[in-house]
Amino acid sequence: MKKTIVTVLLFLVLWCSGCQPTPDKEIVVGKNDFAAKIVSSDEALAIYEATEIWQEEFQSNDEKLSVIIDAPVTVPNVNAFPVVKIRPMVITQEQADIVIKVLLGGATLYEKSVKTKREITDEILRIRQYIADPNTDFNISKDANPEYYAEVLADFDAQIRRLEIEYETAPDSYTPKEASNLFVSEKDNLLAESVITWEQYEQITDFGVIEGEADLGNGKSVYLNIMTDEYFLNNRIIFFNTQYELSASETILLNDAVCIAKDIITQIGLGDMEVAASHTSASNNSFVLYFTRNVMGIPTNYASETDFSNNEPIYSPPWYEETLEVEVDNTGLCSLYLSNPIEVTEIINANAALLPFEKIQEIFREQIQYKNLWFDNPDVV
């Protein structure tokens, strides 16, 4: 049985938004062995020739795969296509201070709270109300997708059981303690839990966490976690609203969501990020926006965070993909997740020559077949 892949996507030669932020600091133009292998171009990218829409249908060599392409092609509005060198960006205390100021707006950060018996009871009640509500996506899927319904119901039941066990030892009341806005070193904990060796411990100079919860007013409580990690390069910012039932009652427009998100990430020093993809969250009436870094007017390819299990250093990446995910609704920022941020340190080639578009198409036709070689299930379409 033949399988069909329908490609309806924005095929990027490279795409660029109208806003091209000025770098905060001068980027060094460098020379190295890799640079010598890159062919330079004397022509501006503005005259790069490519079809406006790529429409094509073809079959794989073994005739088991059919590919349908219907994709607009966008050439970036820039004068050159540079090749740059990047490195992981270690989050500094100064940057953390800015993040705390922007995301918390002056609210006090407290240590992560311990749930009281009353809070656990309320949480169990909310879950049971959600299960009983016939208008939730969960219940609407009951007839259309019974397997999904049963799986989610089992997860809810397990969650309720865990909360009931937690209730037994929970306190009747809890007084929150103010958390530190300074990075708290986690080196000793890593060593005690055998996550690192003593030799690694001595090499780690910057590994700390700022973590806590805050009340932003109007019943909106949030969680914030900032990690600085110079050794494992696992730098991150995690921020989310802990009370999802207070989400907006009306769906926000995409353009409004983008403007709110862009304003926030610009304030925390990520003004060179552009939206690569988005989707609506029906239950929260919000938009989830996925960003990619814009390097000198050209956005990099978007890649979701990936876990690499290969332990061989030669086959492992030096660090993981940069990820920025922001959720926004009519009440403002719902969540922000930044992982493995990068920074540009050097321009290796100021204007590299691009492959002709016909060659790019040829490579795609070959690679799409290799990518799907292992799919031999006739039920896969």
Image (cartoon, grey):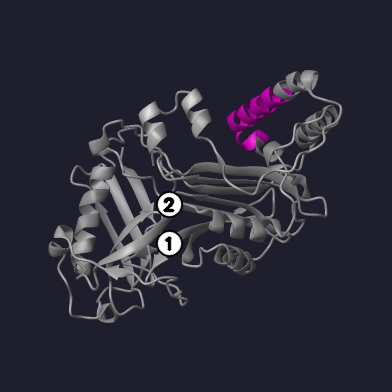
Q: CA distance from mark 1 to mark 2?
A: 8 Å
Vertical relation: 166 (above or below) 329: above
* Residue 261 x, y percent position in the rendering: 60, 63
Q: Quadrant of residue 64?
A: top left
- Looking at the rendering, the stretch of residues picked out in magenta corresponds to 142-160
**Given the image, on which type of amino acid does mark 2 rest?**
Glu
Vertical relation: 118 (above or below) 27: above
Picture quarter with the C terminus: top left
**Is residue 235 visible to the viewer in this orientation of the structure?**
yes
Q: Residues within 10 Å of mark 2 (few under 14, many from 20)?
A: many
> What residue is pinned by disc 2?
322
What is the count of numbered marks? 2
Which one is nearer the viewer's eye here, 52 or 264?
264
**Given the image, on which type of amino acid does mark 1 rest?**
Arg
Residue drawn at the location 69% of the way across and 26% of the way down: 159
* Residue 115 x, y percent position in the rendering: 77, 31
Q: Residues within 10 Å of mark 1 (few under 14, many from 20)?
A: many
Residue 140 within the segment the image draws in magenta: no
Q: Quadrant of residue 317?
A: top left
Return the disc, 1 or 2, that comes first in the chain's sequence: 1
129 sits left or right of 30 in the view: right
8 sits left or right of 114 in the view: left
Which one is nearer the viewer's eye here, 109 or 149?
109
Give the main secondary structure, helix, strand or loop, of the magenta stretch: helix
11 sits left or right of 266 in the view: left
Picture quarter with the N terminus: top left
> What residue is pinned by disc 1?
293
Which one is nearer the viewer's eye here, 269 or 164?
269
Q: Quadrant of residue 126?
A: top right
